[in-house]
Image (cartoon, rainbow, N blue to C red):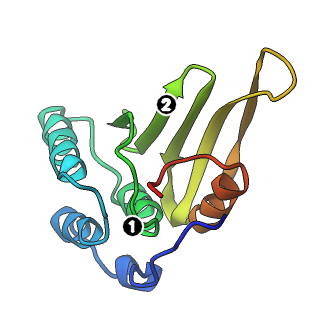
Amino acid sequence: MTLIISKTLSQDKIDKIVTFEEILNYGLDFIKLKDDYFSKRIRELKELCDLEEDDELSLESLKTMFLFIGSLENITKPSSLTVSESGLFYLEWEKDKNDSLTLRFKKDYYLDYVIFKPSLYINKRIILNGSMYVLDMIDYINDLNIKVHQQ
């Protein structure tokens, strides 16, 4: 099974966008989610960061996150969308403590990931982690048959 990648979201186009609002509007145009969860949650996180003098959202992290989620068709609502003190965006899809995917979006369209996946052979979870380019991550989660999209 192969994830369908949207060909309309472009790294070249998103590279040229510089303001938070422009990045947000561009990225939201490509998210195929039934409600406006991403819009509400990202604006809420922006407001929280604006209240803290030392906290600032990473626009590069936001671009990376949008390249990832905007490249998937029919994405499911994540369990959580958060931002770190350093301004990096995190997404998590969690079925339970033994079956989850957490992504931290960085600059240059790279992300860090942690995957908890049940073992097929023993009563323990498998832990996978690393760093890779966002579009390679789509192929990787597809190869592992991890569901972050609707079929």
Q: Kindly state the secondary structure of the residue where label 2 is placed.
A: strand
Q: CA distance from mark 1 to mark 2?
A: 20 Å
Residue in the image at 74% along x and 37% along y: 128
Name which quarter of the figure residue 100 lies in: top right
Q: Kindly state the secondary structure of the residue where label 1 is placed.
A: helix
**Viewer-proximal residue among 18 and 119:** 119
Q: Which mark is residue 137?
A: none
When the figure is inspected, residue 74 is found, relative to residue 41, above or below; the finding is below
> Crowding at label 1, few (<14), some or many (≥20) Cα neighbours within 10 Å?
many
Percent across and percent down for residue 58 are: 35, 52
Residue in the image at 21% along x and 68% along y: 19
Percent across and percent down for residue 89 are: 39, 45
When the figure is inspected, residue 19 is found, relative to residue 79, above or below; the finding is below
**Viewer-proximal residue among 81 and 122:** 122
Is residue 120 rendered to the left or right of residue 2? right
The residue furthest top is 123
Pick whichever of labels 1 and 2 is earlier in the sequence: 1
Is residue 11 rendered to the left or right of residue 34? right
When the figure is inspected, residue 97 is found, relative to residue 75, above or below; the finding is above
When the figure is inspected, residue 141 is found, relative to residue 44, above or below; the finding is below
**Viewer-proximal residue among 64 and 55:** 64
**Amino acid type, callout 1:** Gly
Residue in the image at 47% along x and 62% along y: 68
Residue in the image at 64% along x and 52% along y: 141
**Amino acid type, callout 2:** Glu
Is residue 49 rendered to the left or right of residue 12? left
**Viewer-proximal residue among 36 and 62:** 36
Q: Which residue is tagged 1?
A: 70
Q: Which residue is tagged 2?
A: 94
CB contact under 8 Å: marks 1 and 2: no
